Image: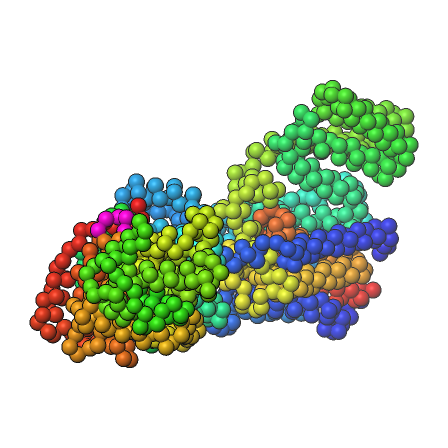
């Protein structure tokens, strides 16, 4: 069935076009952000823009090689590639030099270093895709679910051991693929709730409201609302949801009247009591209809309450610099010298760009090195300052088109292998975009991961190029198998 | 393979998640970049160090082009408190030659300064000497946040004319609030032309925008200096003062209290404006300024007080020419009108004394002999002339208005700060003092001889001399002759005509000439120059009479008009006449040659009048 199809005819040219645009834009941004006043040429190989040009050239070579490989090879050797990269990650932990506390860089020669974690992404994606493509594979079966999770967790743990927590967090993006492949949406809702509870619980833990910690009170109220939501939409039990709502509203009115009358109400205990009564009520309902979805609501609520109380405990167990980063992000402390310095300078650089920007090579904040890591993790600052709001939006729109194009490619794959791999690629690009730009504009904590195609560095550029072009190669052969 | 269409719908959820995140990012970017916020300002204060470029202050020359005041560089130590990092306090203090306690006191005190900001340069020490500057400059790299600001201080070529030149001082909070041009630590003119011509002399500050990187290093000029503003140097000023004459006058007046004002009648330009005691203007430069200023303030002779334009004295007999002019103008007398003098003006119980001279006498000899009785009779004749004036008050108002037109009673408008107007009573003043219609000529008769209520500045007396010399007009006296690239105010180039007809002046000039030839001013008589003059001996409540002289020379085509006033020095002929005549001779001939005159000059240089200060007690 394998016909010798011309790859160039069937490959997705729009994605390649976007790839070229992003890489070119990235290269120019690197030139702009590492530009110094006495530097002249963009092609100077002693400078980062010159070096990046070499990496870009090599990526094109890599991309061409991938396009020449038979698409079935990736599927055939997926596990072997995965195991090889896992071994490389393990070796890295032991042989890598210590670079700013991280042990993730393999020294090839004195000037060339590779970061295997960047390449583990496509290997993991291939392995996961191959697993989904197995005969009669059903993701909803718990055993299969844990196999997949295991495949993802393994490199993640190894990267954590390399002290590259940021890169490890990227593997959370596989959740998107899993959701697409049938994992319950409750996981996503649960994740969002966990973040929400954590943020509110930490941010307002010190504030008091009616004699109770404000953070805990708010979280408990939200837990009640979420509980009603789960019962109403997930368990699809309108009557129970209505009863719970009435109970909450009545309780709120009673508490309000008591407080208005000047009677001291132990708000925290009242809220806990209300949650407890709700759980007892749902357990009772469970014994009338044995709906497992009601039980899920019960478990989710109990887990939420436990999570909430453990938040402060966990938070205080964090490393001091991580705790400061979170406190700065949540606006709890103003620390413009140390932890908050990067983000503050980054916001200043972007904010000073205005609508139209200061013009190419005219950014004062980036030229004068006010923003640390400005050609790697904080490269978006340069765009924000020099190209302004319009340039920043252009980059965001390019990435949006890019990600949605990958989704289109994913959905047209005839086999789960291609689709799963494509969603893994989508998730990885998306989480990089989300965390990197979110960090630069002060919406996410400072997690050092690169902006694909923009941040300086050979490893990350090659990692993303391989990731993308394997997808394009698989996509180019989508019609060959039928 | 079968597709799960139920699961395929989930792509919309994923797409929605992506779009939501992007939308949130765009909103955030919009609020950061387009929304109204301070990030642009922060960015500027991050990256731009705005360095003020101080213009060179205008130079001051005398009327002959001799440089009197120019600039010397000085250095201020500035600190941006926010940028001070790991300062080795001990080393820093040693370099500047101060103690650690002084340093700490400053660091604490500077926070209380109005307009203090830890982000902007604060003056730490001002006017560093060149030696300290050199030491600090070498070590400056070790003190991040410390900068040196170049300043301009004044340098004086000659220790003269402090009252005319003035000096510069650091701006006060009032100055900053009044004029937004000033920043803390700037300098502004204080006293003299430095004050009155501040806007001309100071120029316009410039600004240099430097790029500063994250480590505080200067990386060059922003946009190659395209937005820099070059300072505009202050314009030079040429004074009408003759430096040699001024120095000569100050020497004549040493150890005496009083003033000399010399005016070029044909222009109103002041040739010398001497106030004594005076001081060396370079005392008020540099770090010793504060100490010296306090010392000058405490000095009982009050050298900071410019007697030439601020002190008000009874004009005494120098006032008589004005009376003669008014009586002639009003037709009260003709040059041939004789009045008696029997050792004074005696009417009823009233007696105004006079000295021995031939009597009765007409106008010209009355000036030459300075006859008191003549002017008392004249004033009474005028004020009591009911055929012409309805009342004493009306006559008096006319009399007063003539004097106002001659420059009495109001500021003349010299281009120096602090001029006083003197005092000239009007009828309302007497109405209030004696009651309406309860005063008449005899009540106020002493005013006719420049006593009584009337007070005038030496400048006003000199202006009268100039008016007489011009036979009927004067220019507003001024000390600034020319301004670089500009012209002086037109008020100084327009003739002002008193309300006296020009024909009446000849008799007065004749009288003043007579006074020199064989009257009260015989000391002023020179062989080669026709000097005209009038003495004055002003009684005053503070002690001995003030010695005054008013005159001009030569009689035809006068070059110099002068007023001399020496406090508590006795007869006008004792000090006023010699000093006035020496000044005129020196100015017109360039030196004093006659041996007798030389002796007179030496006597004046060495004489000392320990008098009471002219300061009001």
Q: Residue at x 58, y 55 (%)?
A: B39
- Which residue range is magenta in the image? B540-544
Quadrant of res A183: top right
- Which residue occupies 86% across, 50% down? B6
Query: Does the magenta run of residues contain B431?
Result: no
In the displayed structure image, the side of residue B306 where residue B47 appears, left or right: right
Report the residue at 64% width, 52% height from top.
A438
Colour scheme used in the picture? rainbow
Query: Quick one: which residue is furthest to the left in this view?
Result: B595
Q: Nearer the viewer, residue B192 or A77?
A: B192
**Residue A465 seen in render:** no
Q: Residue furthest top?
A: A263
Q: How many marks?
A: 0
Give the position of the C terminus of chain A as an image quadrant: bottom right
- Image coordinates of residue A296 in percent, x first then y, are 80, 33
Left/right of residue B546 with respect to residue B473 in the rendered view: left
The residue lying toward the viewer, choosing from A191 and A336, is A336
Residue A379 in view: yes
The image position of residue A15, as x and y in percent, is: 71, 66
User: On the rendered structure, is A122 left or right of B457?
Assistant: right
Is A334 rendered above or below residue A268?
below
Residue A361 or residue B305, whichever sits in front: B305
Q: Quadrant of residue A14?
A: bottom right
Q: Position of residue B594 (x, y in %)?
A: 10, 74
- Residue B81 coordinates in the image, percent (x, y): 41, 48
Quadrant hosting residue A260:
top right
Q: Which quarter of the rendering shows the N terminus of chain A?
A: bottom right
């Amino acid at each position: 069935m394998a016909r010798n199809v011309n790859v160039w005819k069937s490959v997705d040219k729009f994605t390649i076009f976007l790839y070229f645009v992003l890489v070119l834009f990235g290269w120019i941004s690197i030139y702009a952000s590492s530009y110094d006043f006495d530097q002249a040429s963009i092609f100077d190989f002693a400078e980062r823009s010159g070096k990046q040009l070499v990496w870009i050239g090599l990526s094109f070579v890599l991309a061409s090689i991938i396009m020449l490989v038979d698409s079935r090879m990736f599927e055939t050797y997926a596990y072997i590639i995965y195991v090889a990269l896992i071994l490389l990650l393990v070796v890295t932990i032991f042989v890598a030099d210590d670079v700013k506390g991280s042990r993730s860089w393999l020294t090839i020669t004195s000037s060339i270093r590779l970061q295997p974690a960047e390449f583990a992404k496509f290997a993991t994606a291939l392995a996961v895709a191959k697993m989904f493509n197995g005969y009669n594979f059903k993701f909803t079966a718990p055993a299969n679910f844990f196999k997949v999770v295991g495949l993802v967790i393994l490199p993640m743990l190894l990267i954590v051991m390399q002290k590259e927590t940021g890169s490890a967090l990227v593997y959370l993006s596989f959740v998107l693929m899993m959701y697409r492949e049938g994992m319950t949406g409750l996981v996503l809702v649960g994740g969002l709730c966990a973040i929400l509870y954590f943020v509110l619980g930490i941010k307002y833990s010190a504030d008091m409201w009616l004699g109770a910690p404000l953070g805990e009170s708010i979280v408990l109220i939200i837990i009640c609302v979420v509980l009603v939501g789960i019962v109403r939409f997930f368990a699809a039990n309108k009557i129970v949801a209505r009863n719970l709502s009435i109970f909450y509203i009545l309780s709120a009115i009673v508490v309000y009247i008591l407080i208005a009358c000047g009677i001291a109400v132990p708000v925290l205990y009242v809220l806990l009591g209300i949650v407890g009564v709700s759980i007892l009520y749902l357990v009772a309902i469970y014994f009338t209809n044995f709906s497992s979805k009601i039980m899920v609501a019960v478990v989710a609520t109990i887990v939420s309450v436990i999570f909430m109380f453990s938040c402060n405990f966990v938070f205080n167990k964090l490393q001091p610099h991580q705790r400061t980063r979170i406190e700065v992000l949540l606006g709890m402390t103003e620390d413009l010298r140390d932890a908050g310095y990067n983000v503050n300078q980054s916001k200043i650089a972007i904010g000073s760009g205005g609508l139209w920007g200061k013009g190419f090579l005219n950014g004062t904040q980036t030229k004068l090195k006010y923003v640390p890591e400005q050609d790697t993790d904080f490269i978006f600052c340069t765009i924000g300052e020099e190209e302004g709001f319009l340039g920043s939006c252009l980059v965001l729109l390019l990435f949006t088109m890019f990600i949605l194009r990958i989704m289109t490619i994913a959905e047209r794959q005839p086999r789960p292998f291609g689709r799963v791999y494509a969603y893994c690629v989508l998730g990885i690009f998306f989480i990089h975009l989300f965390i990197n730009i979110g960090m630069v504009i002060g919406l996410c904590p400072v997690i050092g991961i690169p902006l694909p195609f923009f941040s300086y560095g050979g490893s990350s550029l090659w990692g993303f190029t391989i990731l993308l072009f394997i997808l394009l190669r698989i996509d180019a052969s989508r019609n060959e198998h039928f | 393979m079968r597709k799960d269409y139920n699961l395929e719908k989930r792509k919309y959820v994923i797409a929605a998640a992506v779009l939501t995140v992007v939308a949130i990012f765009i909103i955030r970017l919009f609020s950061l970049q387009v929304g109204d916020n301070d990030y642009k300002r922060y960015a500027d204060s991050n990256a731009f160090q705005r360095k003020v470029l101080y213009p060179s202050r205008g130079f001051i020359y005398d009327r002959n082009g001799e440089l009197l005041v120019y600039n010397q560089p000085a250095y201020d130590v500035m600190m941006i408190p926010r940028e001070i990092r790991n300062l080795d306090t001990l080393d820093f203090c040693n370099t500047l030659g101060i103690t650690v306690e002084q340093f700490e006191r400053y660091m604490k005190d500077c926070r209380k300064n109005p307009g203090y900001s830890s982000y902007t340069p604060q003056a730490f020490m001002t006017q560093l000497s060149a030696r300290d500057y050199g030491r600090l400059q070498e070590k400056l790299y070790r003190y991040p946040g410390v900068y040196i600001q170049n300043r301009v201080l004044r340098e004086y070529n000659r220790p003269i004319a402090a009252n005319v030149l003035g000096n510069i001082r650091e701006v006060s909070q009032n100055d900053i609030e009044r004029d937004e041009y000033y920043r803390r630590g700037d300098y502004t003119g204080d006293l003299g032309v430095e004050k009155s011509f501040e806007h001309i002399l100071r120029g316009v500050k410039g600004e240099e925008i430097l790029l500063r990187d994250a480590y505080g290093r200067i990386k060059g000029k922003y946009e190659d200096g395209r937005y820099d503003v070059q300072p505009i140097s202050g314009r030079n000023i040429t004074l009408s003062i003759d430096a040699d004459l001024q120095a000569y006058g100050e020497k004549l007046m040493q150890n005496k209290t009083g003033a000399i004002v010399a005016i070029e009648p044909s222009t109103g330009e002041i040739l010398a404006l001497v106030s004594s005691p005076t001081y060396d203007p370079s005392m008020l430069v540099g770090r010793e300024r504060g100490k010296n200023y306090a010392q000058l303030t405490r000095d009982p002779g009050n050298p900071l007080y410019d007697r030439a334009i601020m002190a008000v004295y009874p004009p005494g007999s120098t006032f008589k020419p004005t009376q003669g002019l008014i009586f002639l103008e009003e037709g009260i007398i003709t040059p041939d009108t004789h009045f008696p003098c029997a050792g004074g003006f005696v009417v009823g119980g009233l007696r105004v004394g006079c000295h021995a001279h031939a009597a009765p006498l007409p106008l010209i000899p009355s000036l030459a002999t300075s006859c008191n009785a003549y002017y008392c009779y004249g004033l009474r004749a005028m004020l009591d002339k009911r055929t012409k004036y309805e009342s004493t008050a009306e006559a008096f108002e006319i009399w007063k208005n003539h004097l106002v037109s001659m420059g009495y009673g109001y500021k003349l408008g010299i281009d120096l700060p602090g001029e006083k107007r003197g005092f000239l009573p009007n009828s309302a003043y007497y109405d209030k003092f004696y009651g309406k219609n309860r005063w008449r000529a005899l009540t106020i008769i002493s005013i006719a001889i420049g006593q009584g209520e009337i007070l005038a500045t030496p400048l006003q007396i000199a202006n009268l001399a100039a008016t007489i010399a011009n036979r009927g007009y004067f220019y507003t006296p001024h000390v600034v002759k020319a301004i670089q690239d500009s012209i002086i105010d037109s008020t100084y180039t327009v003739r002002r005509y008193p309300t006296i007809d020009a024909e009446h002046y000849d008799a007065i000039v004749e009288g003043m000439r007579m006074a020199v030839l064989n009257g009260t001013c015989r000391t002023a008589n020179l062989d080669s120059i026709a000097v005209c003059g009038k003495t004055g001996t002003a009684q005053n409540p503070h002690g001995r009479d003030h010695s005054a002289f008013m005159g001009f020379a030569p009689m035809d085509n006068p070059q110099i008009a002068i007023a001399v006033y020496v406090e508590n020095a006795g007869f006008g002929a004792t000090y006023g006449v010699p000093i006035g005549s020496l000044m005129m001779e020196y100015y017109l001939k360039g030196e004093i040659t006659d041996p007798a005159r030389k002796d007179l000059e030496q006597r004046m240089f060495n004489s000392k009048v320990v008098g009471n200060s002219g300061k009001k007690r």
